[in-house]
Image (spheres, rainbow, N blue to C red):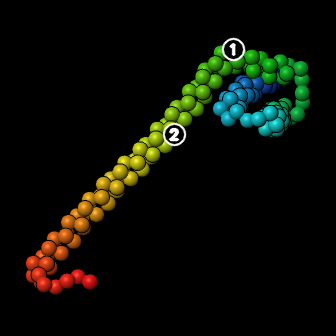
Amino acid sequence: MIDTVRLQLIELGVTALAGVIMGILFDLYRVARWALRPGKVITVICDIIFWLLATTVVFIFLVTYSWGDVRFYMFVGFAAGFCIYRAIFGRHVVGSAVSTYEHVQNVRKKVIIGYREGALGLRRVSTRWRKGFRKGSGTVEALLLNIKNRLFPFRKES
């Protein structure tokens, strides 16, 4: 009798833990949908995929800890775990996920802007070098022409 009650309490705790895990996965999925902003058709397809995965996770918990035996207290455990998660940790997980997403976006923008600024700076430098080379080569060409004219004053260019 005591072993049965202890086993049922363990199963209740495991189902509550599964409810917490499902709450975390659900909130992360919500943040992903917010961040990606898919269309209605993609949202429906992703919802179906999410709930199939959620059903698989719940099934694995049930098979692993209760050999597939489903009792009413297990549903209570799932619901209690999900509600406890939403009441205590839900805001923090969503806030952390959103701030992580925004931080990654800011870093990505800085990297892209830095790359563009670097490329623009290289373009400016190469333009200056090219102009300097043209100017220098023109000066050298004029110098050589002047030397040639002084050495051979009567020779005409054709």
Kind of residue at disc 2? Arg
- Quick check: can you spot residue 12? no
In the rendered structure, the answer to whether residue 140 lies left or right of residue 127 reads left
Q: How crowded is mark 1: few (under 14 residues within 10 Å), some or many (20 or more)?
A: few
Kind of residue at disc 1? Ala
In the rendered structure, the answer to whether residue 95 lies left or right of residue 79 reads left
Q: Name the residue under label 1.
A: 87
Tag in front: 2 or 1: 2
119 in relation to 103, above or below: below
Q: Name the residue under label 2.
A: 108
Snapshot quadrant of residue 79 = top right
Of the numbered discs 2 and 1, the one sitting upstream in the chain is 1
Q: How crowded is mark 2: few (under 14 residues within 10 Å), some or many (20 or more)?
A: few
Return the residue nearer the eye: 79 or 116. 116
Total numbered circles: 2
Q: Residue 60: x and y, percent?
A: 81, 37
Q: Which residue lies furthest to the top in this view?
A: 87
Q: Residue 147: x and y, percent?
A: 12, 76
Give the structural element (helix, strand or loop) at label 1: helix
Q: In which quarter of the image is the N terminus?
A: top right
Give the structural element (helix, strand or loop) at label 2: helix
- Give the Cα distance between marks 2 and 1: 33 Å
